[in-house]
Image (cartoon, rainbow, N blue to C red):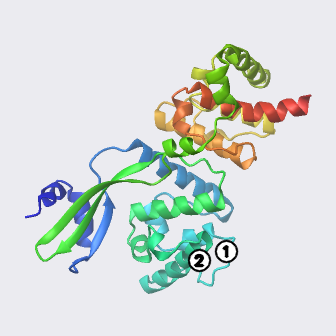
Amino acid sequence: MEPDFLNAVTLPSTLDRFLTDDVTTKGEKRKLIKQTSNNPKLEELKLFLTEWINRTLKEEHIVVKSLEEDLYDGLVLHHLLGSLKLDVDKIALTEKKQRQKLSVILEAVAKCLQLEERQLKWSVESILGKDLLSTLHLLVAIAKHFEPTLALPPNVQVETITIETTSGGLKTSNAVEYITENKENIEAQTKDDAFDELFNCAPDKLDAVKKALLQFVDQHVGKLGLNVKDIESQFSDGVILLLLIGQLEGYFLNLRNFFLTPGSTMEMLHNVNLALELLAEGGLLNFPVNSEDIVNGDTKAIMRVLYCLYSKYRAKEA
């Protein structure tokens, strides 16, 4: 018996999915996300992508609740790629029609992204089979191409298990796979900006910059009866940042779209991700921001985001 098979036996949900998918051909391989422990970053990405799809397709009255269950037949993907003219039926009721539709859609995506078949991390069969790993890779690729300013949660990685049928039974192997870019790699490729220089070379000026940013924020959210004194703690839940964006951009944020009094890290991440998306959509954010840094009260990350608003609206007021 293969040693890794003992490890696979402890993952009944993973094996059940594999065995019930009628994958019994010798040499057949399937790679799945291991479901052994809680993965907050994975859940954050799933929520982020679900909300992005729902906002994008809001006018078409399409609501996605599950990435695996709602995307496999190609209907949502077809609408999501509305800018591409695809010769496919709007609704495919049979599995044959769904497979044909997915084939056309995925071929168009690969051509648009200029990817060769060996570079693809998804397939018609995996999407049709409701494979979460393939679905996430596909959505991230689409989002990065069609909305390059979208602040996708970075550093999302998952433990995977590859299962292969052999003459001796099931053979498994484990690995760790990134779904979104490794933040450390991004930072290594990014030159120091003004805030890096401020923190590293002119820490004596840091308090003055903080004070200027806080005064700017206070000037606008003060109209709502709020008082802002601390950058590290008062922006970590995303509420003041959202209210500030609303005040500066002149629109009302529906209270149903965010958590006014977030009670968990996931709700705080939801708020921060929404704020970053609004900034990106408004053309104010042209660099990657890790939403977890904001939630964790990272001073440099928060100041960078605030400065995007400060630089635009101070110039208008001058």
Above or below: residue 241 compared with residue 207: below
**Left or right placement of residue 154 versus residue 1 in this view:** right
Q: Position of residue 237 (x, y in %)?
A: 56, 30
The x, y position of residue 18, in whole percent, is: 26, 68
- Front residue of 119/229: it is 119
Local packing at callout 2 (Cα closer than 10 Å; few below 14, some 14-19, many 20+) is: some
Q: Which label's residue is closer to the chain start, 2 or 1?
A: 1
For badge 1, the amino acid type reads: Leu
Kindly identify which numbered label has been placed on residue 149.
Answer: none
How far across and down, in percent of the image, does residue 308 sit?
A: 74, 35
- Which residue is label 2 attached to? 108
Disc 1 element = loop
> Measured along the vertical axis of the image, is residue 90 above or below residue 174?
below
Q: Nearer the viewer, residue 213 or 224?
A: 213
Type of residue at label 2?
Answer: Ala
Question: Mark 1 = which residue?
Answer: 84
Marks 2 & 1, CB-CB < 8 Å contact: yes
Using residue 28 as the reference point, say whether residue 48 is left or right of it: right
Q: Residue furthest right?
A: 318
Q: Residue at x 66, y 51 (%)?
A: 149
Q: Tell me the quadrant of the picture where the N terminus can be found.
A: bottom left
On the question of residue 139 being in view, the answer is: yes
**Toward the viewer: 98 or 190?**
190
Q: Residues within 10 Å of mark 1 (few under 14, many from 20)?
A: few
| Pick the front one: 311 or 16 | 311
Q: Residue at x 57, y 45 (%)?
A: 189
Image point (78%, 23%), residue name: 216
Give the position of the C terminus as an image quadrant.
top right
Q: Is residue 174 above or below residue 88?
A: above
Tell me if I can see residue 227 in this picture. no
